[in-house]
Image (cartoon, rainbow, N blue to C red):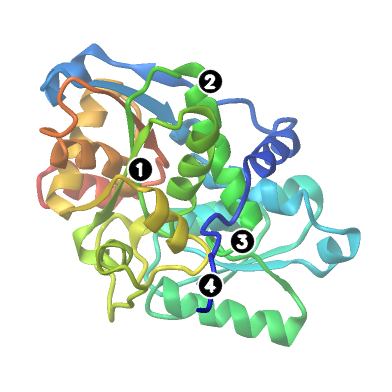
Amino acid sequence: MAVPKIVDPWPIRFADVLDAERRIRPHLPPTPLRRYATLDAAVGAGISVAVKHENFQPTNAFKVRNGLALVTTLTDAERRRGLVAASRGNHGLGLAYAGALLACPVTVCVPEGNNPEKNAAITALGARLVVGGRDYDESVQVAQRLMHDEGLVLAHSTNDPRVIAGAATITLEILRDAPELDALVVAVGGGSQAVGALVAARELAPELRVYAVQAAGAAAIHDSWHARRILSRDAAVTFADGLATRSAYELTFPALRAGLTDFVTVTDAEIATALRLLLSTTHSLVEGAGAAGLAGVGKLRDRLAGARVGIILSGGNIDAETLRQVLTGEI
């Protein structure tokens, strides 16, 4: 009888996380992990929430970790060639920041109608902005064409072990500051944060429950997780643009399948409610993807009763018009 092939679901090891931390630390100090009594009171059910402020990064988003983790591994020849990436904003910002810091030209492909303030921030850091495609997935195709036509190095926002290792440094810091946590609730766009959390937790806190949350209008990875196979969707519709992907990814999906405790979705209205609550309790700005973790805590409230729970405010780059709609209850 043939022996079934055992496929390792883990795209990185804990040693890769430590190595990424070593590379990014000269450029990025740890971000704060804070608790807010008013937030705990609002969440209720005896849940204590630890808030990781990735919205305090120099690009206002965690993906600067990913960008630096990637660019710091490039050879001199690769840096001279330059990078190209598709992004809804924060991955592009992280690469643009790293490129400016480490003398590497960066091209960022964004979809039509992308957040204008993220676009402006990318170009302000010296990156070339290319607009093309109706959504993130089509912008990936634009980036791939530029890779072939111009000889650029492709920097995928998810399907790269260096990116995942950079994202894992978030949970590395969380568990050093709060080893007593019972659970993390992590938003998923491509899955680098969640897989990074799983890799760090396997080493530092094996009993930690890691839950994933995705926008209901962009639920391809959630649906894939429950179906136990990679699925694609025709559209990804959510104001939380950092979550607007239409497919699961081959590098992160197996680890999500192997390690997550559960995977839930939240509506845009639930994300907007969480965003307003974070504004009133932490008094710091978050974007939709950054509020999705708290929205997930609300969805999982009964299961998390009495637990010490970590969430990640993954970014704060919300544009003025979207913020207005959130504050007035239009979303």
Rendered residue at 49%/76% (across/down): 139
Amino acid on which the number 4 mark rests in the picture:
Val
Q: Quick one: 317 or 189, which is closer to the camera?
A: 189
Locate residue 8, reporting x and y percent. 55, 60
Q: Which residue is mark 1?
A: 186
Amino acid on which the number 3 mark rests in the picture:
Asp
Question: Which sits earlier in the primary sequence, circle 1 or circle 2?
Answer: 2
Label 2 element class: helix
Locate residue 259, reporting x and y percent. 40, 48
Q: Which residue is mark 4?
A: 3
Q: Which residue is mark 2?
A: 176
Rendered residue at 74%/74% (across/down): 152
Q: CA distance from mark 1 to mark 3?
A: 19 Å
Mark 3, other Cα within 10 Å: few <14 / some 14–19 / many ≥20: some
Q: Which residue is mark 3?
A: 160
Q: CA distance from mark 4 to mark 3?
A: 30 Å
Amino acid on which the number 1 mark rests in the picture:
Val
Label 1 element class: strand
Question: Which sits earlier in the primary sequence, circle 1 or circle 4?
Answer: 4
